[in-house]
Each structure stands twice: as structure tokens, then as C-alpha cells.
Amino acid sequence: MESKTESTQTFQTLENFGHSLSAPSIVITPKTVDEIYQGVKFAKKNGYQIAARGAGRSYNDAALNGGGVVMLFTEMNNITSWDPETGLITCEPGVTLEQLWHKILPDGWWPPVVSGTMTTTLGGCLGMNIHGKNNYRMGTFGEHVVEFTALLPNGAELTCSPNLNGDLFYSMISGMGMLGFFTSITMKMKKVDSGYITVNAFPVYNLDEHLTAIERDAPTHDYTVGWLDTMVGGEALGRGQIHAANYVHGNEDPNPSSSMKLESQILPEKMFGVFPKSLIHYFMKPFSNNLGWKLVSTAKYVASLRTGKYNQSHAAFHFLLDYVPNWEKAYGRGGLIQYQSFLPKETARETWTKLIDLSLSYHLPSYLGVTKRHRPDKFLLTHAVDGFSLAMDFKVTSANQKKLSQMLQEFDKMVLEAGGRFYFAKNSETSRQTTEQFLGAETIERFKALKRRTDPDMVLESDLYKRLFA
Amino acid sequence: MTNERFEAPTPLHPFKKAIVIGAGRGIGEAIARKLTREGYLVGVVSQNFDNAKKVSNQINTDAGEILSLAYTHDVKNFDEVDGLLKQVMDDLGGLDLLVYNAGILLPTTLTTYQFENDRTMMEVNVTGAMAWINAVAPIFQDLKRGQIVGISSVAGDRGRVKNPAYTASKGAFSTYLEAIRNRLSRHGVNVLTVKPGFVQTDMTKNQTGLFWLITPEKAAEDIWKAIKSKKQTIYTPFQWRYLMLVIQHIPSFIFRRLSF
């Protein structure tokens, strides 16, 4: 390893999810804990800093480190133990959610929290402390970790759980990979009786109904998520469709062992049985402008007016982002950015009305809006609130950059005034001042104090960390 | 170095990244300024730290953000190059463009011969460039992108009685750049050779008989256009191309009798 990195310091261009940023880095791909440590020594010796990277699915610069070292964990991806009796699984940090559910579903288990794509790695999921469509009920990914082991840049290897090294447990999870590297992760999975989920889909006609429906249905459903048509304002502002879903229980599935087989879950590669989905993004591209997308959005809304109840596989329900491979390329050369705001339930309605109105008056509508219900958590750099989140996708072009940037600064101000928060895997334009405001100076100082302990030489610095904290 | 950091690029506030060697004054300074106005972050490298600092401070004050940082480096210290490149790339967050502008013209007369002066000109004008290009070329080659710009001179197009070492150094630099271009163009990397005529800088301050004199800003404007359109060789101002074409074809039995 040492000799390999010494002799081949080749730079490689890495991108973010959304293709809106790229940066050259020296990529080190460890397979063992010792190789991680050799990588740290190499970086220290040569004066480089390191960013940790899993699947590279952050929408911003969290897994980039231009001009420095990126430690890529995709080859440290063994599932070291799985106990179908207790639901405890131990994995290396590069294991993906896809590997995880493939392993456990045939035994009747499912990950308690998943992201919208299954390509993410456990290390990345923990670094960002991801949430799913069941955040209000199951909390974040980190809440299901029984313990993990970590290698700190100071060379120490230690085990953390809520009761052991608790301060590091609650800060490495959510810590953006800036305190140390996860080397092994043990988590508790969720027992399921069937490979299916029952989805209730129904339309909502404005923002008030939208949020009321989510708040009403969340307590009685395992998953609740809304699609919000961000292209309309006025009376219909906030219209969309709610999906409230429940696990299929015991005797409701006549043949659970069959529905839990991987064959019943795998996302089809072709649409209508004939059309290869890998080509769809090319056909989406012509619609990727304000007029075209309004057409798509309206069509989607009209289609959603029918109330429906149907069964869907876990994979099809959860991994929407994988349903159309490379969908993000439809946004064209400038790529896309995502703006997600987390707002207390008391201020969400009013604030999002202002945000959407503003985006329409700027003629910079978001092409996709997704709403979720959240609950607070105990992790140090938490993004959660007792309220809702709205994620908005924006297309980036060289012509709209300035206006879009100005608009998002106005967004940030409104969200902060309303007591909102932001998420470090998503927003790319958050400023240092905004970060200080929503996290609070005390929280940041606590994080930095921990960092001085685990990483005294400041070896771990991603572009995100440099931009907002260093 | 100070604690200053470059502005961080975001999708809505993107930057390209450049290093300009010999940017403390003259053409290099003008290029550094021009690049920062065109969306680049620039590492301003000069032998004289005060000059580098002055240039970068002014750029940052004008822009209201940190678009440049100053670095001190004597291009004759070839061993420093790897370390400094690493540091500047780390500070910039990558590299899209290297401009080698360091150059020196030590005056001589038609009858003096001073090896030390000749060696200094070769080291500053050519060997230093080789040190930088050898460090940057493999990186650009791996990335399959990037651009290298060498500020050579019309003086390199012919060996002239006035200053043998200066003309030789610029001739060597131009030939070297051509060879590097031939190597790297197949990897998607562009190499631009710039041949300025007379430019109002400290180098031409005490010279007589200057014509077609342009400001460093005008030269930088031409160079920027060539960078943007990925040209291979430019003369600035452009009419030098035709003059040099003629001069290159003056037969030796005439050329060796001229005093220019």
C-alpha cells in the first residue's frame, strides 16, 4: 500500500451527486484498517488532507477534497456477520444499502432506515446520519447503530456505543467524516413479515391540506412522504400527492417467503417490459426546462388525482432515485442542486409559501419537491426538527447561477428566521454564517473541541468542512 | 503564509484554478488580474514576496473576495517546485491552468561574454519552466484536461547578436513547449506558446528603438482570448507574426551583418 501510493500519486477527477461540482484528488482505496492507517500516514507525511468518501451521493462538496487525498471506502465492503435470529448485522463501512437488504430480506428483515437510493454506503449514511420516509417514527440511521469501531487520525482505534465513548458516538455519527473513520458498524435491523408494502396514494390540493395530511397520517403509518408540485403558486400552491404506507403484516401476505425473495424486489431494467430504463434520462432532457417541466409536473398531478391503494415491493417503494438510472443527467451540463429546509411544524406552512412564491417570481421554479415528517434527535450536528422538510431540486445553468444563488440566500434567511435547519449532505450554497446560526456557536465549538482531540493535526478536511467550519 | 483561504467554489459560485509563475509585475501581473476577472482563483507566484502580496491584495480588494493568494518562489530553486505545487493545488482545490511567465533579460553588449548571466537567463527562462511543466504535465495527463501557457518571446525565433543567451533561452522554451504540446494534446491538454513583442514592462524600460509597444494589459487580453479558444501559438500584438515570418527568412549572410 505504502509503496503503491508513493509511486503513483495520480490525480483523479471526482464529482458530487448531481454533477454540479468536480475536483481532482489523489484517491486511496483501502481494503483493511491497516491500509486506512497507511493512507493517513501518507497524507500526513506529504502535507495532504483527507476527505472520506463512500458512494459519492452527497449533493454538495462533502465527499470532495480538491488537490488533496480522498479515502474511498467502496472496496472495504464485507458483511462480517449476520444473525437472522437477533437481526444484528456487522458490516465494513463500504457496504451499500443494496448489499444490506439483499442479505437480510430473504431472512425476513429490512433496514430500519433507508435513503432514496440504495447505492449509498453505511459509512456515508452514518457520516451524514441519513433519514428516510419514516424519520418521525424510526429516527435517523444512527439511532439503529448498536456500536461501531473507529480509527482516529491520531492512530487510536476504539469502540463507540451510546454508553461507551458516548460523546464520540453522538458526534462521529453526523460528523461528516471529520472526526475519524468508521471501520466496523453493528446495527439492528427491522423484522418484516412480507416483501410488500401497502401504499395509500391520494391527492392534496394546497399546502395546508398537504401538511395536515402528513401530520394526520404519520402516526398511523410506517412511512409517509409527499410529492409537492413546486411549479404552481396561488390557490393551488403546495398541491401534490401523499403516499402513506404500511408494512404488510403476518397473514396479509399469503406467500411471504416468495415476496421476500430478491426476484420479487429487483427493480425492472425495462419500462413496460421493453424499453431499457438506462436510456430514459436522454428522453427526459428535452423536458428539463421551465415550460417542459411544467407540462410533466401538471401531467403528474393530474395522474395523481385518483386515490389508490396498492401493494409495492420494498425496493420499488424506497429507492425511487434508482428507478430511472442516471436521472440526474437529465438536468444537463450544469447539473442540479438540491435545497432542503427543515422547519418546525408551526412555521413550515408560512415559510414554504414564501419560498415557493419567491421561486416563481424569480422564474426559477424547483422541478421537484418532496415533503417529509421529522422528529429531533440527539446527534451533535443534527439537521432534524419536530416538523417537516421540503427538498427542492433546481437545475443549474451558467445563465441562472447568479440569480439562483441570490434567491437561495433569501431562502436561507427566511428559513433561519423561522427556526429552520439544514442538512450537510444536501445544500451546497449554505454559508458559514448560516451554519453558525442554525447549529449555534456552542455546538460548533463542541465539535471542534472533539476534533482537536481525535484529529490534532487537522488531517481530515473535506471541501465542505473547509468551506463551512475550518 | 497567512491564514487566508481562497473562496470556496459551489455549484452556483464556481471557479477555475490557475497558477501564474512570475506574477509579481509586468505581463504576469496583468494575466493574474485578468484571470481573476474571468472566474479563476489564482496562485500568484513571484520571487519577490512583497510584489506577489501587493498584486494579490489589490486583486482581492478590487473583487471584495479572496480570489488570489501570494506565494514566494525563485524559479531557480528547482527542488522547491514539487512541494510548492502541492501546496498551491491544495489551497486552490485543484488546477486547470499553469502560466509560466518568469523571464529575465540581462543586458549585454556586442563584445561582452558573461557566463554567469547566460546561465541565469537559461535557468529562469527555460530550466525553471521545465521544472514546473514536468511537475504539472503528469497531473494534467492523468486528468485528461488542463492547459499550460508559456510566455516565450519573438526573440526566440532567431539567434540575434544583441543577446545570444536570451534569444537562445526563448528559442529553447518555444521548442520545448511545442514538444510538450505534441505529447499532451493527445491527452486532451492544451499547450499555448505566447510570443510577445515589445511590452511596457521593467524589462523594456531602458531599451531604445521600440515599436508596436503595448501595455501588459493588452498582452493579457490577447493571451486570455488565446487561452479561451485553446490556441497553440500566438504573437502579441498579432502583427509580429508577419514580421517574424519575414525575419525568419532573412538569409544568414544578411542577418549576421545586422546589428539587431
Image: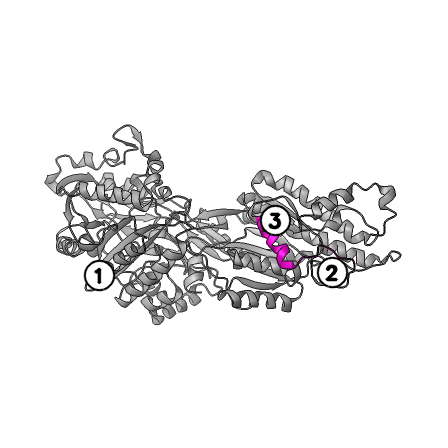
Chain of residue at mark 1:
A
Spot occupied by residue B212 in the image (x, y as percentages of width and height): 71, 54
Q: CA distance from mark 2 to mark 1?
A: 66 Å
Range drawn in magenta: B209-227
**Would you call the spot at circle 1 few (<14 residues within 10 Å), some (14-19), or many (20 or more)?**
many
Q: Which of these two is toward me, A253 or B125?
A: B125
* Magenta region includes residue B220: yes
Residue under the image location 20 percent in, 55 percent down: A234
Residue type, numbered disc 2 = Thr
Residue A301 visible from this viewpoint: yes
Q: Is residue A271 above or below residue A207?
A: above
Q: Quadrant of residue A443?
A: bottom left
Chain of residue at mark 2:
B
Residue type, numbered disc 1 = Ala
Residue type, numbered disc 3 = Ile
Instruction: Find numbered disc 2 in the image and state the secondary structure of the residue it sits on.
Output: helix
* Magenta region includes residue B109: no
Which residue is the site of mark 3? B148
Which residue is the site of mark 1? A348
Q: Are marks 2 and 1 on the same chain?
A: no
Which residue is the site of mark 2? B204
Q: Is residue B88 above or below residue A101?
A: below
Nearer mark to the viewer, of 3 and 2: 2
Instruction: Find numbered disc 1 in the image and state the secondary structure of the residue it sits on.
Output: helix
Q: Is residue A51 left or right of residue A327?
A: right
Of mark 3 and mark 2, the one earlier in the sequence is 3
Residue A30 visible from this viewpoint: no
**Would you call the spot at circle 2 few (<14 residues within 10 Å), some (14-19), or many (20 or more)?**
few
